[in-house]
Amino acid sequence: MGNKENKSTNVVWHSATVTRERREKLHGHKSAVLWFTGLSGAGKSTLAHVLEEQLHQRACSTYVFDGDNVRHGLCGDLSFSEQDRVENIRRIGEMAKLFCNAGILALTAFISPFRIDRKKVRDLVGDDFIEIFCDCSLDVCESRDVKGLYKKARKGEIPEFTGISSPYEAPENPEISLDTGTQPLEDCVQQIIDYLESREILPPQTS
């Protein structure tokens, strides 16, 4: 199912009169794709949802694409084979770009283990792509194994499991790198907010 040539014919891209810039003005902030990546158990989903809560309290328009949730719908037809994992990330990249064009802060929480797949999304989204590396040791991730996935992987019950039987390629130059293994959650969230303010994606918060 990988990224193939576009087989749709007789289709024309329609330009809307309501532009991204007008949507951003309505929302009171700029849009972007915040791409959380890291091992299973590194804290991607937790961090993304806590960040979204804080952004929501600042009246920001947001949406979190969570790995498990997306697998229930948009990517419910995909397996965890290498080919389907590539397609999974491609679909999420395309969807996140649409949300970004809608003036929304799109947060994605996926392992997305391979640099080449993340680069494809970066190339698709451009400067709006913000890679956030949830840097957490395998030992800590395994200690947080609430789903028991690592135990199953070490028993050989889950093939191609990232960190055990399949590699994770850490980002080389992420926009944000967080020590999610030892750094408090609230500090990680604040680090992201500080970055968004420094990029003028978020307006400075007034007291």
Image (cartoon, rainbow, N blue to C red):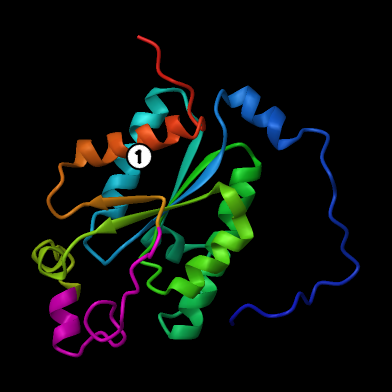
Q: Is residue 164 above or below residue 75?
A: below
In this picture, which residue range is highlighted in magenta? 150-173
Question: Looking at the picture, how far across and down is residue 175, in whole percent?
Answer: 41, 50
Q: Nearer the viewer, residue 170 or 69?
A: 170
- 164 vs 13, left or right, is left
Residue 206 sits in quarter: top left
**Predominant secondary structure in magenta?**
loop
- Residue 115 shows in this picture: yes
Residue 187 sits in quarter: top left
Furthest toward the right, the residue is 10
Question: Looking at the picture, how far across and down is residue 42, in whole percent?
Answer: 23, 59
Q: Disc 1 marks which residue?
A: 192
Q: Nearer the viewer, residue 165 or 190?
A: 190
Q: Residue at x 37, y 62 (%)?
A: 68
Q: Nearer the viewer, residue 127 or 109?
A: 127
Question: Looking at the picture, how far across and down is residue 181, in whole percent?
Answer: 15, 55
Total labels drawn: 1
Q: Is residue 105 above or below residue 145?
A: above
The amino acid type, in three-letter code, at marker 1 is Ile
Q: Residue at x 82, y 40 (%)?
A: 16
Question: Looking at the picture, how far across and down is residue 150, in whole percent?
Answer: 17, 75
- Residue 75 shows in this picture: no
Check disc 1: other Cα within 10 Å, few if <14, some if 14-19, many if 20+.
some
Indicate the quadrant containing the N terminus: top left, top right, bottom left or bottom right: bottom right
Secondary structure at badge 1 equals helix
Q: Residue at x 68, y 80 (%)?
A: 4
Furthest toward the bottom, the residue is 156
Indicate the quadrant containing the C terminus: top left, top right, bottom left or bottom right: top left
| Residue 151 among those drawn in magenta | yes
Q: Nearer the viewer, residue 40 or 66?
A: 40
| Residue 166 among those drawn in magenta | yes
